[in-house]
Image (cartoon, rainbow, N blue to C red):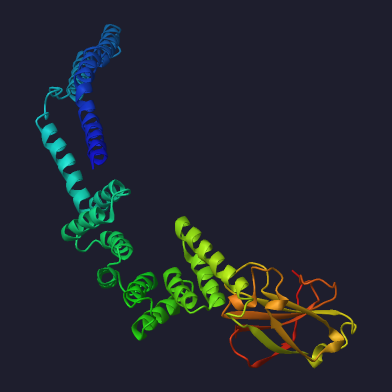
Amino acid sequence: MTALWIGIGLLSLLAVVLLVWPLWRATGLRKSQLTAESEDRHNAENVAIYRQRLAALEESLAANEIDRERFNADSRELERRLLEDADTQHQRPLAMSTTGRWLLPVVVVCVIGGSLLAYQHLGASENLALYETVQSLQDAPLKRQQAKLEAMTRRQPQNPEVWAQLYPVYRDSNQYAKAADVAEKLIDIKGRQPSLLGHLAQAEFLAAQRTITARVQSLLDEALKLDPRQPVANEVLGIAAFDHERYGEAISHWRKSIAGYQDPQAIKALKRVIGIAQQRMDDTGGKAVQASLRVKLALDPRLTDRFAADTSVFLVARDPDSDGSPLAVIRTTLGNLPQALTLSDANAMMPNRKLSQAEHVELIARVSASGQAKPHPGDLYGTLSDVDVSSSDRRLLVIDSVVSAQ
């Protein structure tokens, strides 16, 4: 908070300077104006013009061009105009440069006081105090962090940021019931957001000895319906799958968590446990999770005779939640269609990306005139989305579309 008050003080000082500066200049400006007025030559010029015109009248009178009566009338008119011009040029005297200075302290107090009141209502002093507290507790023991943050929740009971900082302290100190209460409090303040539902499910999952109860499952379903990649919910499902030796399923959930997390430390930890799950799959020869997809591949009759019988056909399984390489690939030829094919871990392109690591995949079949898996304009293709890897049913995949030119 010290930095904040220093900043407020400096800005207030700048505001005072901007208010006082015109008054500092007032005395000098008044002197300049008085000097300019004292040097005003306008009346002198009017008098000179008057004398010239009066002399012209006198010459006309001497030359008998006008009579005495006309001379008197015109001279009186000249005098009248000279007096009118002099009266028009009369100016009010300048006020003293000290006039109104009593208002300065009033304005200064109003500006500074108004700014402080506006900050109290519109600023984020509570979050600033929380930030400084969190920074001071970075290396402190969990008990000290807990005591400080609990004190802040009593001072700021409706500030969700304080409760959000307290949640991981309870969780990491195995106080899962309190962590669940904090998650409930956050939901009361901010509503049923996917991240908050995920944290509540996490706390109740850990409180139930890492068991997905009906309550936990309901919370997970609600969170994932709102956000299928919600990282905490997927992390919980990954832990449950790992505990039951469903390593492929665990890896699939943790990869979704990585896609949703912004915290580098959390991503690093998940990559480490994914490596452990992969190693256990390798140690058991992949027997912990048996994954295979039976597919009947066919060509739409409307697209026959477009390519030769020996044209390559690729059947690919992809993880819809990952941009990486395919999980499995089979190659056949157009002349063999319709054909029954089975995709499994044996068809993996890379040893660390297998079909058994996913729950649902997207199937893509492509007739490639170039003989390459990469699509080209004119190639034929067909797709099936959201295919359940654990199901033993045979799927029908029909190649019924043409790749358009880009």
Where residue 344 appears, as percent x and y from the top left, is 68, 81
Q: Which residue reaches farthest front?
A: 283
Given residues 36 and 365, the one toward you in this image is 365
Q: Is residue 81 visible?
A: no
* Rendering quarter of residue 316: bottom right
Position of residue 300 relative to residue 187, above or below, is below
Q: How many marks?
A: 0
Where residue 334 appears, as percent x and y from the top left, is 84, 85
* Rendering quarter of residue 227: bottom left
Q: Which image quadrant: the C terminus?
A: bottom right
Left or right relative to 198: residue 132: left
Q: Which image quadrant: the N terminus?
A: top left
Position of residue 243 relative to residue 391, above or below, is above
Left or right relative to 105: residue 380: right
Position of residue 162 relative to residue 237, above or below, is above
Given residues 332 and 369, the one toward you in this image is 332
* Rendering quarter of residue 19: top left
Residue at the image point whose x is 80% and y is 92% from the top? 338
Q: Which residue reaches farthest left?
A: 102
Given residues 169 and 34, the one toward you in this image is 169
Left or right relative to 255: residue 210: left
Where residue 346 appears, as percent x and y from the top left, is 71, 77
Position of residue 313 relative to residue 12, above or below, is below
Q: Is residue 358 visible?
A: yes
